[in-house]
Image (cartoon, rainbow, N blue to C red):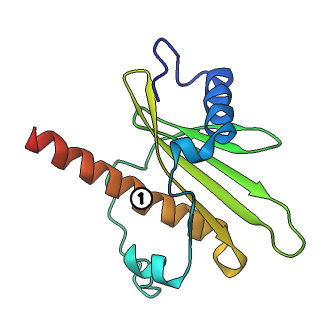
Amino acid sequence: MTHHGVTMKNPVSLDLCYKKYMGDLYQWLPDGFTTIDLEVLQQLDLLHFHETVHVDSGVTRYFHVVESDEKLTLVNEEFVIWIVPEKGENDGCTYTLIARNSQDDLHLELGFITKGIYNRSHLVLQIIEKYLLEIHATEALLKKLS
């Protein structure tokens, strides 16, 4: 999805992009949201609870935060992330959308949902970090191959 001439740090522009994605989610995310479970955490290599080694990649360090009643929006030069908590009968769930932000264009990369025991803020942030690193690595590889 291309948004030429849109300042991506403008909250109104970001909100319009978010509404456009959510309005026709299956066009932008044909596979829908990935539901986070034990298997996905294992694939993302996030099951090492006793390891405290953290590599500062620089990819996930600096974000501008835009907060509204509906969602939290994180923005930097490379990514736009929408974190949308939903209150439910029990614990509720959290929807997260990650878009690549490049040259005034936004491209929705993926979405995931956390529910139940997986719906914890520290875990959601770790999952976001892993996905950002994967997207960054894929972009670097594609650049190298072209």
Provide residue 114's location: percent of width, then percent of height: 64, 68
Establish if 135 lies above or below 23: below
Find the residue positioned furthest to the left: 145
Residue at disc 1, secondary structure: helix
| Relative depth, front residue between 25 and 85 | 25
Residue 120 showing in the rendered view: no
Provide residue 27's location: percent of width, then percent of height: 54, 42
Establish if 92 lies above or below 99: below
Find the residue positioned furthest to the bottom: 50
The tally of labels here is 1
| Label 1 neighbour load within 10 Å: few <14, some 14-19, many 20+ | some
Residue at image point 66% right, 57% down: 95
Provide residue 63's location: percent of width, then percent of height: 51, 40
Quarter of the image for residue 104 reads: top left
Query: Image check: 78 left or right of 114?
Result: left
Residue for badge 1? 131
